Structure formats: structure tokens, C-alpha cells
Amino acid sequence: MMRLSALLTGFFSLLMPAGGEAADLGTIGPVYEVQEEDLVQVMMQQARHSEANGSWQQRMESHRDQMADSSLVANGSLPRAQESRTYTLDPSVTLQQPLLRADGSVLYPTGTRINPLDYVNYRKTLCFFDAGDREQLEWVRMHCGMSARDKRIAVAGDVRLLEPELGRVYLDQEGHLVARFRLTELPARVMAREKLLQVEVIGL
């Protein structure tokens, strides 16, 4: 059976780089009002329980240790986009096992389809680029640094010299986000649009 924390981790891992900088992508926006039991509130209760019994701290320490050993070089390789295009992705998941409350009782049964964007308003923009391509770096500088909500994610190249120029840069070191967002060209940006994730590939 599936715990609430597993669903929460699964969705937000979709929105976070898998390697490199061990930093949060920011605070989630306001929670939507729903008629059924508040899924976010139940998740928060479980998170508090994990913090109280020490398991949360153990996971955070393990994560920091892994990040300390990570390289600051992203190893992906995607071609530069020649034409701009836009497509959408549905982040919904169909439960393959029951989703449980913190006390072990069933919140949602197997087969329930859940879209996390029904419960949270995610306002961040994720900008993907090749750190070794000067034209892509210029695009990032011009279009992905105007707001604190913009998160710059290198798919390829060495990012150690970029922070003085671009500010904080994240890594998709093992290509997990490239696969999840079905990226085949760069640069690109991803943002939430109503109940979908919108992917914009930028032709340069």
C-alpha cells in the first residue's frame, strides 16, 4: 500500500533536479479549496509525524551527503532547437495501490486518478539549457532570470563558472527531468497551466 509521502515525493521530484545543487525550488502557492478531505493537510500531518520521530532528519542528512558527492557537471546532450513549439503534459497519476493517511486508513482506493495540480498552485518556471552553448546562455540571461520563480536547470555542461553570471543554477545531472518532460531539444521551459504542465521549446 502507498503512503501519502510517496505520492508527494513522486510529484515534487517531477519538479526538482535530480542531481547537483541540493536546494528547494521554492514555496508552493496557495492550496485550493476542495470539497473532499484536504489532501495537502493530510500530507502536512504526515510530514510533521516524520519530523517528530526523526525519520525526516535522517532522510535530509542522507540527501545532503549524496549531494556533497555530486559533480557540478551535467552530462546530458540535446541539440539546439531550430523551431519553437509548445506541448502539454498531464501530471495525473492513477493509483496502483491504495493511498493511505498517516494513521494507515485508506484515503483513496486503487484506481483513483489524482492530479496534484488540483490541490496546489505551482507558480515556478523551469528553464532548461546547455551550459556550454553561449546562445542558450544568452537566452537564459534574457528570459529566465527576471523573476525569483525562474529556476535555471543545466542539462549539459559545467556550471561552476555560471553562478556569478546567472545566479543559482541547478542540474539535471542524470537526465531525469529531460525524460519526464520529454525534452528532445534545448532551450525549453516548463510551467503549470491550469491542470497541465506546458512545455515550450525555444527555437534559436
Image (cartoon, rainbow, N blue to C red):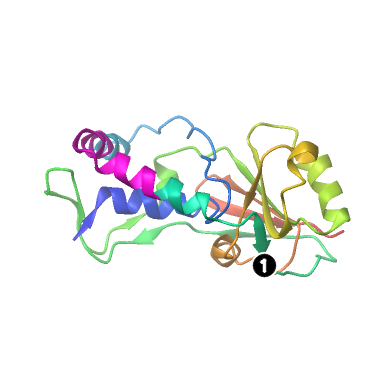
| Residue occupying the point 50% across, 51% down | 67
Image position of 179 (left or right of 120): right
Residue 191, relative to residue 180: is it above or below?
A: above
| Residue occupying the point 81% across, 42% down | 141
Q: Nearer the viewer, residue 42 or 52?
A: 52
Picture coordinates of residue 2, whole percent (x, y):
23, 58
Q: Is disc 1 placed on a helix, strand or loop? A: loop
Q: Nearer the viewer, residue 170 or 187?
A: 170
Q: Which residues are magenta?
A: 45-62
| Residue occupying the point 78% across, 70% down | 79
**Label 1 amino acid?**
Gly
Image position of 161 (left or right of 118): right
- Image quadrant holding the N terminus, namely bottom left
SS majority, magenta: helix
Is residue 116 on the magenta stretch? Answer: no
| Residue occupying the point 52% across, 56% down | 18
Q: Nearer the viewer, residue 158 or 114?
A: 158
Picture coordinates of residue 39, whole percent (x, y):
29, 41
The residue tagged 1 is 76
Picture coordinates of residue 127, whole percent (x, y):
69, 49
Is residue 49 on the magenta stretch? Answer: yes
Circle 1 Cα neighbour tier, 10 Å, few/some/many (<14 / 14–19 / ≥20): some
Residue 10 can be seen in this image? yes
